Amino acid sequence: MAKLLIEGGVPLVGRVPIGGSKNSALAVITAATLASSGTVILDNVAPVSDVRDMCAILTALGADVRWAGPTTLEIFAGGVNHPVAPYHLARKLRGSTYIVGALLARLGEADVAFPGGCQIGSRPIDFHIRGFQALGADVALERGSIRARARRLRGARFYVERASVGTTVNMMIAGSLAEGTTILENAAMEPEIVDLANFLNAMGARVRGAGTNLVRIDGVDRLSGVRHEIIPDRIEAGTYLMAGAITRGSVEVTRVIPEHFRTVLLKLEQAGAVIEETDDAVRLTMPGRPRAVDIETLPHPGFPTDLHPPVVAVLSLADGVSVVQETVFDNRFAYTHELARMGANVKVDRDAAIVRGVEQLTGAPVEAQDLRGGVALVLAGLAAAGETEVNGLEHVDRGYVGLAEKLQALGARVRRVDAA
Ligand code: EPU
């Protein structure tokens, strides 16, 4: 068990380099198992705990996975021959669903425990299962696992309900080695989908249209290793900009692609932030108290659901009443009870958080219950008067590397304590 101790009230000032996208890495690392020859080298991989767990799953499948540098991964998947993902690992993360698509495509069978991940709603996997069935797989749910089989997957036309990110990833991975063409309608358009398509194509796949809602995958017989650099993490970037906003400081995020979080920048500007950007960096300066803004989370290019809890933390100190509507996940509000301990006035009405800004938050012991809710509590603690203790930091470790060090470099008084 780890916790973060925060002495709040310091405006954060400085520059913070952003790491590689966790969600992109989870998809790309899984897709690396499709390469029956050659080595995949991935640069800019953030060694967050979800990524390390995914690497452990690949190793269990028979891949050779090693860190060749702090953020460089080498994967040789020629030896992948075991269709069972270990239960204790697969159940920890949502991204393990991708292993089903990869194993079906590569070995023709898969046995993977029901995925875990953050408790932010019911998070079913019915779309994924319908997708595998559309490609001709037999799928059964037995003893807490997804068991799927197909001699060879066959391309098909498939409508992706709710523009699901995970389903789009799985269908791109599985479709790449299927016989014939797969067409995804209403595909997710997130930057991570485009990154995955670029990686698959570099390996020899034929994926067209990624980044639009119509993706076409012409199946090929084999894929081989390549070198690829993971895109920057737009959610990590947004989080540090919000750390600048909530403390009324001036924070620059570097090594980012501002186009990937345009809506976030627009909303922060509406809240009173001054935004300056170059091709690969964004500086946010918050000259005074934030103003209230209304936000609706939506699939890309809308405001990302993963930045809903952090932005509510910022708006909890705004002048006025903000309404933040969550349209992607059905229960993402657990963190609001913890924010209330710090003096925030946030009421949840069905799928909306109604945030009445207060002038000051006060430090308190609080408990992170999921990744993005946890980091929202950290942001609140940075602005609060007195000491905040964020427990359950292992939830935050799933998506942020070196959080304490990066915040310290911006001038924050924070200290991480790992229980022996
Ligand atoms: N859904 C279903 N059935 C399915 C799949 C999805 O009902 O079979 C629903 C979900 O419950 C949700 C909606 O469809 O209401 C969209 O979910 P989506 O499939 O897009 O989400 P995901 O693939 O499970 C990924 C990210 C999340 C991110 C969402 C939305 C990964 C590993 N996870 O989840 O990231 O919030 O897309 O952008 O890529 C995080 O990083 O903290 C995180 C939760």
Image: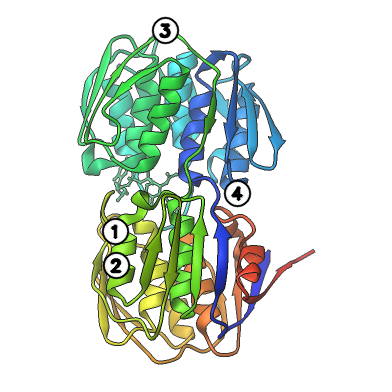
Q: Nearer the viewer, residue 288 or 235?
A: 288
Which residue is the site of mark 4? 48
Q: Is residue 85 visible?
A: yes
Which residue is the site of mark 1? 263
Type of amino acid under label 3: Asp
Which residue is the site of mark 2? 267
Marks 3/1: CA–CA distance: 39 Å
Question: Do labels 3 and 1 touch, CB within 8 Å?
Answer: no
- Callout 1: helix, strand or loop? helix
- Callout 3: helix, strand or loop? loop
Q: Nearer the viewer, residue 143 or 56?
A: 56
Q: Nearer the viewer, mark 2 or mark 3?
A: 2
Q: Earlier in the sequence, mark 2 or mark 3?
A: 3
Mark 2 close to ligand 1, CB under 8 Å: no
Q: Position of residue 367 (x, y in %)?
A: 55, 72
Type of amino acid under label 2: Lys
Q: Nearer the viewer, mark 4 or mark 1?
A: 1
